[in-house]
Image (spheres, rainbow, N blue to C red):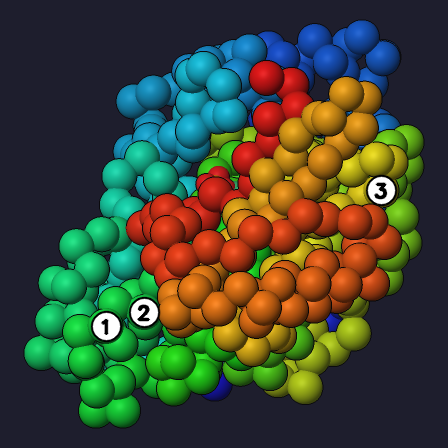
């Protein structure tokens, strides 16, 4: 089933025409209403009427998270505050958060985009969805909520945390769809096992996961532990929140809602735009946003775009799993390391749970990396020879994948801190 066949299955040419018309309008609105855009355009002699083709988008300077920080809180709003009906914020890595605002139309489009991904993943009117994303300034909870309701799904706004209660609700209310971050959903599985919940008696069938990446191995683990089909969706506060893209039941890439967001892939070092099929940084331009139009926003997320028609019938461009971020990519002794590479190694190994933490330090001038890995069975810690064997094995496998030597420390089950939101996998102490 397809929620909006007219758009989701549109011919590529019609989509491009629609995008161009909307792009021209967005550029004009941004130029006329947001001083930062006017300044950036004027500095290089660019005028909205210079944008006559989709390719012309490359003339527009990039927007970055710093632009949002520098214009905190409302400086980039193109609509007056009286037209803004919702505010959200995303915590920045330092200091103040970034603030985003939505008009009534933005809210309508947001629900529409979520409705598309819910249906694409296999959610239906008779489903009961338990949202374990945080509600609040984070876009996850409220974002998914409104789109699920639009489809007619019964929504349980459980929010994150209170894990035992989540499990009670799941059993008693007959939850069929779990909606949250993959790491929290995996943690919930652990608690369910601890409490002796018979997961085979649950009605769960589907997961809508996002807000952070997870490897194919982690997805398989979640599917196995809950007995569900796990789909992924993508988004970011600066652009909309969830609903920028979502996977269909084929699980072969996330369909981008291209009538609302124009995607590009660039070389993150040079800023040069790449053809489809190349790996690079995702850059998004909003095509309908009234609250905060974003022109060429650098997401820092690394992915590949695929324009092939999907077997589900949708023609929208798909983005592959996010392979990492340009800014969480660790450079260890000159080698690029993504936490996801480490995760794939660990999850494939026997005796190892899905929880880990990467600690990066400096030893003199040398970077050092240590991976804390949680054991499934704490008794192993008493058997020194077995422990040593396992540590060696992990170290070896990590070396094969990462091409660098990482220290491995096996730790007791449940000793790595759990979160109800996004997992903190990396502790980089090099600059401290
Ligand atoms: O995480 C929005 C969201 C909520 C998306 C719920 C999906 C579901 P922010 O807090 O602004 O917004 O964080 C955005 O999270 O740039 C990515 O780095 C990361 N991210 C989001 N979804 C995925 C995903 C929300 N499916 C940042 N895979 C983005 C990998 C993801 N990373």
Image position, residue 246 (x, y; %): 54, 65
Label at residue 412 = none
Q: Earlier in the sequence, mark 3 or mark 2?
A: 2
Residue receiving disc 3: 335
Residue 190 is tagged as 2
- Vertical comparison of 380 with 131: above or below: below
Q: Is residue 105 visible?
A: no
Spatial CA span between label 3 and label 2:
34 Å
| Residue 171 to residue 331: above or below | below
- Mark 3: secondary structure: strand
Mark 3 and mark 1 in contact? Answer it, CB < 8 Å. Answer: no
Q: Which residue is more in the foreground, 8 or 239?
A: 239
- Quarter assignment of residue 398: bottom right
Q: Does label 3 or label 1 sit earlier along the sequence?
A: 1
Instruction: Compute the Cα span from label 3 to label 1.
Output: 39 Å
| Label 2 near ligand 1 (CB < 8 Å) | no
Dots 1, 2 in contact, CB < 8 A: yes
Q: Nearer the viewer, residue 188 or 127?
A: 188
Within 10 Å of disc 2 (Cα), the crowding (few <14, some 14-19, many 20+) is: some
Query: SS for tag 2?
Result: helix
Q: Quadrant for residue 305, please give it.
A: bottom right
User: Which quadrant, please, contains the C terminus?
Assistant: top right
As drawn, the label of residue 194 is 1
What percent of the width, then of the height, locates residue 335?
A: 85, 42
How many neighbours does mark 3 have within 10 angstroms: few (below 14), some (14-19), or many (20 or more)?
few
Question: Which residue is most to the bottom?
Answer: 201
Using the rendered view, name the quadrant where residue 43 is placed.
top right
Q: Position of residue 362 (x, y in %)?
A: 71, 26
């Amino acid at each position: 089933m397809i929620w909006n066949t007219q758009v989701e299955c549109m011919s590529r040419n019609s989509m491009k025409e629609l995008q161009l018309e909307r792009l021209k309008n967005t550029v004009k609105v941004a130029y006329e209403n947001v001083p930062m855009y006017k300044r950036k355009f004027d500095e290089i002699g660019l005028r909205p009427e210079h944008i006559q083709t989709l390719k012309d988008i490359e003339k527009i300077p990039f927007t970055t998270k710093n632009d949002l920080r520098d214009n905190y809180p409302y400086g980039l709003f193109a609509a007056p505050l009286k037209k803004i009906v919702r505010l959200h914020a995303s915590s920045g890595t330092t200091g103040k958060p970034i603030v985003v605002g939505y008009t009534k139309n933005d809210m309508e489009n947001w629900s529409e985009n979520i409705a598309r991904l819910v249906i694409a993943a296999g959610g239906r009117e008779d489903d009961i969805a338990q949202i374990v994303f945080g509600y609040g300034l984070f876009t996850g909870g409220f974002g998914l909520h409104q789109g699920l309701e639009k489809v007619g799904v019964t929504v349980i706004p459980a929010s994150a945390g209170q894990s035992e209660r989540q499990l009670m609700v799941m059993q008693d209310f007959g939850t069929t769809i779990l909606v949250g971050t993959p790491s929290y959903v995996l943690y919930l599985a652990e608690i369910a096992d601890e409490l002796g919940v018979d997961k085979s008696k649950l009605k769960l069938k589907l997961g809508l996961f996002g807000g952070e990446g997870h490897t194919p191995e982690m997805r398989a683990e979640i599917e196995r532990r809950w007995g569900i089909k796990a789909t992924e969706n993508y988004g970011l506060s600066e652009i909309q929140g969830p609903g920028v893209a979502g996977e269909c039941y084929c699980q072969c890439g996330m369909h981008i809602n291209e009538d609302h967001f124009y995607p590009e892939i660039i070389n993150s070092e040079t800023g040069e735009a790449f053809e489809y099929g190349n790996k690079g940084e995702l850059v998004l331009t909003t095509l309908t946003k009234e609250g905060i139009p974003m022109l060429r926003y650098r997401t820092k997320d690394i992915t590949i775009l695929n324009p092939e028609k999907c077997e589900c019938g949708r023609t929208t461009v798909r983005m592959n799993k996010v392979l990492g971020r340009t800014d969480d990519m660790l450079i260890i002794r000159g080698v690029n390391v993504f936490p996801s590479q480490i995760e794939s190694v660990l999850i494939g190994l026997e005796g190892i749970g899905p929880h880990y933490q990467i600690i990066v330090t400096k030893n003199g001038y040398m970077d050092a990396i240590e991976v804390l890995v949680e054991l499934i069975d704490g008794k192993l810690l008493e058997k020194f020879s077995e422990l040593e064997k396992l540590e060696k094995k992990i170290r070896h496998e990590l070396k094969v994948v990462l091409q660098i030597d990482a220290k491995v420390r096996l730790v007791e089950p449940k000793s790595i801190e759990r979160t109800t939101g996004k997992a903190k996998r990396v502790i980089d102490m090099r600059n401290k």
